[in-house]
Image (spheres, coloured by chain):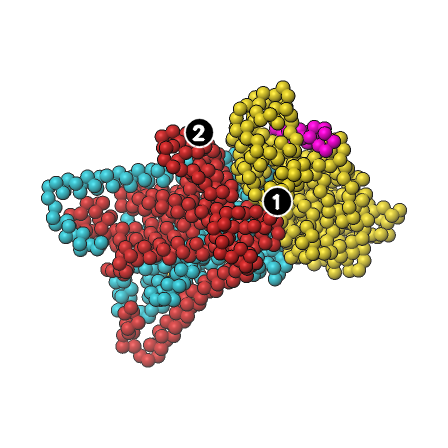
């Protein structure tokens, strides 16, 4: 399976073989196109469903008001938006540097037994159900403090974000051609400088995708927050207090008894997706030229 | 690796020492982050094992295949949940990976930028939809479609094959497999797309110059280069499939029984934890649920090892990525 | 350090800085409301002035009107809407300084958090079991609202409520009765044309007090059920399909013709689900309602520790699938600052006319006054810092 053996096959081309090869090319192109259609259709349907259900509940009040008392339609979810912003931001600030460090370690020093073990552990970590992470942090932070805190929630989210970003960083750093690195060495750059100034920036587009994927995921996680941040129907910005989050409230409202709760749950889901859309558009607009992988 | 031997060129002593100090700090820092990851995972394992101990002691190894789950009588076995998790996540992984790679190839190699860019955004956006939305859509749209249209057709045409009969309802293991496929698709697709896009153009150009068709270029020059990265994406997807709770809980039917057809209700390990953990019956029940979380970790671990061995065998130990 | 933000490496650091900024920004946006929190939490509760309100041995409902505290409670999902509404009323009508954050994490979660003392009070659909009580022996299981469970169904062409008895429902959920036109069902429902269709039973897949009350009733009325399944928040169901939450069960029932399920009365009333009349201990078929649920409470003697099941209660009007919902409060506390406001708030919930009206308005069943009278001595015995929490 390396280029040389494939290339030698190609020289054996005869008329019939050529036709077969062109046919294979057409068939596989069609298969890829059809696969794209099959994959994208349900995704479109889900987005459409979300829009259809969510638009009705969207209003300015949703963004600027705190929840009404149960049973009284109206009100908003400002507390949840603020809480999600704080906790996801904090989790990203905690988790991403560690994750990138770990990914760089795996890529640069990971071609040995220690790297093998750590890579396994990172993969295993990615498979931990999020509720388990919540329980772990509950035992580690909440129980000793006897207090539910947004900080504990952010740490739980950071742990979920960590393996995703770390693994993607590793893969992306490994993809940087060795020639780039060797050029830096040839100019006398030390290893750390080569990695920080040459390798990481080259791998950046992929890493940013990874961070965005991870942030999107933790922004929608309710389970790890249940036993850490707990939730709060009041607006709170104190990270050492219980705090609300959009996914927590979406879940409570989605299975609750009131129609206006269901409507707000859909609107919140739509809101969450819209916010993520804006974040990723903004990130790509700001770093656009650098983020585009291939023209 | 030859990197260590690359010297700083003809530097004065002080400069060389400073560079060395920089390398030392750098190495220490990234090693520390890696060590932190080890600590976190070990801490998690310790926490889980210590809290699962009563259940491990009482039920021993048969916990893995016993199918009784009765909180009232305090008899616990994870057999049905393990089967449910394996079926749903493996089916979803295979379907999603094949689809994701094809779509990623389409986006990078075939589609024009005006199509591939918005599609790429869209795909990443889908990773942000909360899983409860997937679950509700799975029940109200996909479930109804399966019950009214897809299911009856399958039963009528393929019903003679074992596992393809049964009564299609809005919930069941088939729905769970499909919803998981849809959910993990964006992750695998986004990673695969980046990995494929990162394949140097020299690879493509070289093989095209030799007269290869586009598909041959993909097969010979691009896929081998991207394989390891796609694997990484697939493992992240698998991890999400194995650990997904809310969406699966909403669509799988939550019945403690091994399904005998693709439309039967079933149960997964993550679902039973999510369903019962906040309302445990007694301490043994809690311990057994934590043991399930532990088994889930071990299963992820085993799947990882197997997947890596497979890739290693296919590439016969070569790391394709290091070639230039 | 400053060079880190420049050059090709810059974007990554900017991204991190942006993440931190978002956190700060979010903090700044909503800051105003919370500014008084730390002081509020630190201030010691003053309590109602004992001299003013203890004149004739009666305590005013608004005894806690001068309290100041930030309280956290967690537990029962069923009770969450009414508790949050009550605490909202309490904050607006009585004690401006008391903010109670109550979150629905499930009764089991509530019991656990209460035992671990991470919350100031818990709420649970069932009282503490003996094993749980052993871990927190100084607990008052305080009933504060009533709940009941209705049997709902999806059957085409049936207009008036179906009638069920316990033995039949048990047989349906055991899988012994498989068809709607089973003789047992047609005998209970003379004049109703029941179809020759398979019954699809739906149950709660998540552990829940609703399942506990439902199976507790089935265990009392069906020896078969008691021996094969028993009473549990997480019973191992012999037949049927599981949905998560009231909503999940409702979805299955609505989407599946010929199905049957069970949900809370409050939920069924709000969502206008059809529900069946159920035969009670004295042989009458009772329509579930706020009145018949309250009648069930009246039909059972309240024991000294208040831990009691009121399913299958005596009384011609008593609806048989009912239960108390409990607040979990310590019988004594070292500090009064958060403890007294909790006690005062529950005193208001149990004694105020406003609180009862709020409950009825949300389709919850407040405790009848006779029951409340039996709870008063236990509340008056609660102590903090060595003194009574309520004025004597």
Residue B7 visible in the shown view: yes
Taking the view exactly as shown, the residue that stands out farthest to the left is: A14
Q: Residues within 10 Å of mark 2 (few under 14, many from 20)?
A: some
- Residue in view at x 54 percent, y 50 percent: B76
Could you tell me how far apart the alpha carbons at marks 2 and 1 are, in whole angstroms? 33 Å
Can you tell which chain is drawn red?
Answer: B
| Subunit of label 1 | C
Image quadrant containing the N terminus of chain A:
bottom left
Report helix, strand or loop for mark 1.
loop
Q: Nearer the viewer, residue A62 or A262?
A: A262
Q: Residue furthest top?
A: C191
Residue indicated by mark 2? B148
Q: Residue C217 falls in which quadrant of the image?
A: top right
Which color was chain A given? cyan
x and y percent of residue B284 in the render? 59, 54
Q: Which residue is mark 1?
A: C233
Residue A167 included in the magenta stretch of the image: no
Magenta residues (range): C269-289
Check if residue C272 falls in the magenta segment.
yes
Extreme-bottom residue of the structure: B13
* Residue at point 32%, 40% (across, down): A35
Q: Number of labelled discs? A: 2
How far across and down, in percent of the image, does residue B160 sit? 37, 33
Mark 2 falls on what kind of element? helix
Q: Which chain is yellow?
A: C
**Badges 2 and 1, same chain:** no
Give the residue drawn at x 36%, y 66%: A113
């Amino acid at each position: 399976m390396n280029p040389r053996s494939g290339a030698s096959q190609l020289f054996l081309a005869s008329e019939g073989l050529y036709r077969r090869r062109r046919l294979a090319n057409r068939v596989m192109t069609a298969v890829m196109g059809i696969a794209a259609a099959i994959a994208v259709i349900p995704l479109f349907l889900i987005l459409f469903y979300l829009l259809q259900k969510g638009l009705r509940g969207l209003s300015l009040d949703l963004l600027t008001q705190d929840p009404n008392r149960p049973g009284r339609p109206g009100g908003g979810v400002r507390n949840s938006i603020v809480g999600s912003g704080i906790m996801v931001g904090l989790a990203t600030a905690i988790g991403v540097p560690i994750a990138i460090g770990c990914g760089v370690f795996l890529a640069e020093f990971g071609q040995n037994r220690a790297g093998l073990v750590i890579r396994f552990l990172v993969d295993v970590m990615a498979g931990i159900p999020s509720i388990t992470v919540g329980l772990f942090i509950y035992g580690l932070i909440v129980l000793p403090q006897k207090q539910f805190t947004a900080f504990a929630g952010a740490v739980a989210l950071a742990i979920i974000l960590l393996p995703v970003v770390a693994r993607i960083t590793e893969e992306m750093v490994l993809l940087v051609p060795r020639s780039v690195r060797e050029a830096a060495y040839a100019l006398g750059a030390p290893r750390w400088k080569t990695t920080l100034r040459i390798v990481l920036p080259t791998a950046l587009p992929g890493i940013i995708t990874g961070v965005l994927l991870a942030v999107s995921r933790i922004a929608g996680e309710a389970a790890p927050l249940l036993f850490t941040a707990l939730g709060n129907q009041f607006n709170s910005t104190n990270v050492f207090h219980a705090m609300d989050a959009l996914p927590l409230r979406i879940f409570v409202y989605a299975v609750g008894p009131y129609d206006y709760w269901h409507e707000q749950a859909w609107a919140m889901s739509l809101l969450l997706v819209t916010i993520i859309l804006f974040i990723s558009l903004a990130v790509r607009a700001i770093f656009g030229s650098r983020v585009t992988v291939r023209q | 690796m030859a990197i260590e031997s690359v010297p700083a060129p003809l530097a004065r002593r002080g400069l060389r020492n400073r560079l060395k100090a920089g390398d030392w700090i750098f190495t220490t820092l990234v090693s520390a982050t890696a060590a932190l990851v080890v600590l976190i995972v070990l801490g998690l394992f310790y926490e889980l094992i210590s809290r699962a101990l009563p259940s491990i002691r009482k039920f021993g190894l048969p916990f893995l295949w016993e199918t009784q789950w009765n909180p009232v009588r305090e008899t616990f076995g994870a057999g049905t949940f393990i089967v449910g998790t394996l079926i749903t996540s493996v089916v979803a992984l295979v379907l999603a990976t094949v689809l994701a790679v094809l779509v990623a190839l389409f986006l990078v190699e075939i589609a024009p930028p005006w199509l591939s860019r918005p599609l790429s955004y869209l795909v990443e956006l889908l990773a942000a939809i909360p899983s409860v939305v997937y679950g509700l859509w799975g029940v109200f749209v996909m479930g109804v479609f399966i019950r009214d249209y897809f299911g009856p057709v399958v039963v009528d045409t393929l019903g003679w094959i074992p596992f393809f009969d049964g009564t299609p309802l809005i919930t069941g293991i088939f729905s769970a497999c499909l919803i998981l496929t849809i959910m993990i698709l964006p992750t695998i697709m986004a990673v695969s797309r980046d990995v494929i896009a990162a394949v140097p153009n020299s690879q493509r150009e070289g093989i095209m110059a030799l007269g290869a068709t586009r598909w041959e270029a993909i097969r010979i020059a691009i896929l081998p280069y991207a394989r390891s990265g796609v694997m990484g994406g697939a493992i992240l997807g698998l991890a999400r499939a194995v650990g997904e709770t809310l969406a699966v809980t909403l669509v799988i039917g939550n019945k403690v029984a091994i399904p005998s057809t693709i439309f039967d209700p079933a149960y997964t390990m993550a679902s039973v934890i999510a369903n019962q953990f906040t309302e445990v019956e007694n301490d043994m029940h809690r311990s057994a649920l934590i043991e399930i979380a532990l088994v889930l970790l071990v299963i992820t671990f085993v799947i990882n090892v197997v997947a890596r061995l497979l890739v290693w065998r296919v590439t016969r130990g070569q790391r394709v990525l290091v070639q230039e | 350090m400053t060079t880190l933000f420049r050059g090709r490496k810059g974007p990554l650091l900017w991204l991190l800085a942006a993440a931190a900024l978002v956190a700060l920004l979010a903090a700044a946006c909503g800051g105003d409301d919370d500014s008084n929190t730390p002081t509020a939490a630190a201030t010691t509760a003053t309590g109602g002035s004992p001299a003013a309100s203890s004149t004739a041995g009666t305590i005013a409902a608004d005894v806690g009107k001068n309290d100041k505290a930030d309280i956290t409670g967690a537990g029962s999902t069923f009770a969450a809407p009414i508790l949050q509404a009550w605490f909202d009323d309490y904050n607006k009508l009585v004690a401006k300084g008391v903010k109670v954050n109550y979150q629905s994490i499930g009764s089991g979660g509530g019991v656990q958090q209460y035992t671990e003392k991470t919350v100031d009070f818990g709420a649970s659909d069932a009282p503490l079991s003996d094993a749980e009580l052993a871990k927190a022996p100084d607990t008052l299981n305080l009933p504060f609202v009533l709940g009941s469970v209705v049997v709902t169904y999806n059957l085409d062409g049936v207009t008036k409520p179906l009638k069920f008895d316990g033995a039949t429902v048990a047989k349906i959920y055991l899988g012994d009765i498989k068809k709607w036109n089973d003789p047992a069902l047609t005998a209970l429902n003379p004049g109703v044309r029941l179809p020759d269709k398979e019954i699809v039973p739906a149950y709660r897949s998540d552990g829940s007090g609703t399942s506990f009350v439902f199976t507790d009733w089935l265990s009392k009325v069906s020896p078969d059920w008691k021996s094969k399944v028993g009473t549990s928040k997480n019973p191992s169901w012999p037949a049927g399909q599981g949905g998560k939450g009231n909503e999940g069960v409702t979805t299955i029932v609505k989407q599946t013709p010929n199905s049957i399920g069970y949900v809370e009365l409050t939920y069924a009333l709000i969502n206008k689900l059809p529900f069946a009349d159920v035969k009670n201990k004295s042989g009458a078929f009772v329509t579930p309602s706020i009145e018949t649920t309250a009648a069930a409470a009246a039909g059972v003697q309240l024991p000294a520790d208040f831990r009691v099941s009121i399913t299958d209660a005596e009384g011609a009007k008593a609806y048989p699938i009912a239960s108390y919902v409990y607040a979990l409060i310590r019988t004594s506390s070292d500090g009064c600052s958060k403890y007294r406001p909790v006690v005062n708030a529950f005193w208001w919930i149990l004694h105020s006319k406003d609180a009862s009206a709020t409950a009825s308005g949300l389709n919850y069943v407040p405790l009848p006054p006779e029951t409340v009278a039996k709870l008063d001595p236990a509340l008056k015995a609660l102590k903090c810092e060595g003194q009574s929490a309520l004025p004597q």
